[in-house]
Amino acid sequence: MTQVRFPRTVVGGVSLPRLIIGTNWMLGYSHTSQAKDRFIREYQTRERIAALLEVFLEYGIDAVMSPLSEHLEQSIRDSEQRTGKHLIRIYTPSFGFGPQADPSAEQAFDQCAEFGATFCMPHQCVTDALVDRRSGTIRDLATYTAMIRERGMIPGLSTHTPETVVYADKMNADVETYIQIYNSAGFLMQVEADWVMRIIQEARKPVMTIKPLAAGKLLPVAGLAFVWSTIRACDMVTVGTTTPDEARECIELSLDLLSQRIPQNTLQETRSKQSLK
């Protein structure tokens, strides 16, 4: 088992690894096709997810970001039991608005607390619906952050909208971190990458970047090189992988890039590359 420990940062007084375990490729959100989503869901058994999590834990990468999922929570507990290590849960719940909402914010936050979440960050579909560009504010935010604090969790915001970070900072919102899409392809980003780069650089709180590989549309070395070289030492990268081998590859590439080493990963072998040897 490896002795290398991944670099860490501090968010809201909690020590976190700078690489966070993403879960889209465990839970079936491929951003590719319905067929790919179905494949992921059928492939990712409780046992396979637990084995995947254990690779990250070998390197001290002990934080996982996810929507509320009983399937994932069972896998997390399996990996914790087998390794004797604790995984920090960063949950991104979604909920509706108003008295008839199902689930309500209270129900979603209660379930996050029940699952042992350290961080509770309302998902993009909630956060961005509250962004008011006319007033430069995020509506009702203090109500939700207070509810999160009351349940013993640390509040943050998950967003696809660059204004969220700017407005929350101007409001002195009670949040400790942001989730923000950031990749060199501009995948799912609402403005150019250099704009988001500047927003991250000027954010008052650490930023958890997501989709560094643009949902598999960028080579790992290319996508990771971009994000690691353009975020701050306090910021983080969230990466999703499907198999233990993929996890180990992304971790090792990240360690090389953070140390400014040219990665020596094993290259893909195809017949068209035989003349390059």
Image (cartoon, helix red, strand yellow):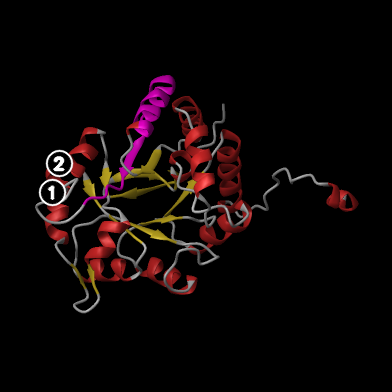
Considering every residue shown, the one lying at the far front of the view is 35
User: Which of 205/160 is in front?
Assistant: 160
Q: Can residue 86 be found in the magenta stretch? A: yes
Magenta stretch bounds: 71-95
Residue for badge 1: 147
Q: Amino acid at mark 2?
A: Arg
- Seen in the picture, residue 69 relative to 204 is either above or below; the reply is above
Residue for badge 2: 151
- Crowd rating for badge 1 (residues with CA inside 10 Å; few <14, some 14–19, many 20+): some
- Seen in the picture, residue 130 relative to 58 is either above or below; the reply is below
- Seen in the picture, residue 203 relative to 126 is either above or below; the reply is below
Element type at mark 2: loop
x, y percent for residue 29? 45, 47
x, y percent for residue 53? 47, 33
Q: Quadrant of residue 174?
A: bottom left
Which residue: 50% across, 63% down? 187
x, y percent for residue 52? 50, 32
User: Which of 22/261 is in front?
Assistant: 22
Whether residue 125 is visible: yes
Which residue: 16% across, 47% down? 104
- Crowd rating for badge 2 (residues with CA inside 10 Å; few <14, some 14–19, many 20+): some
Q: CA distance from mark 1 to mark 2?
A: 7 Å
x, y percent for residue 62? 41, 37
Q: Is residue 164 left or right of residue 146?
A: right
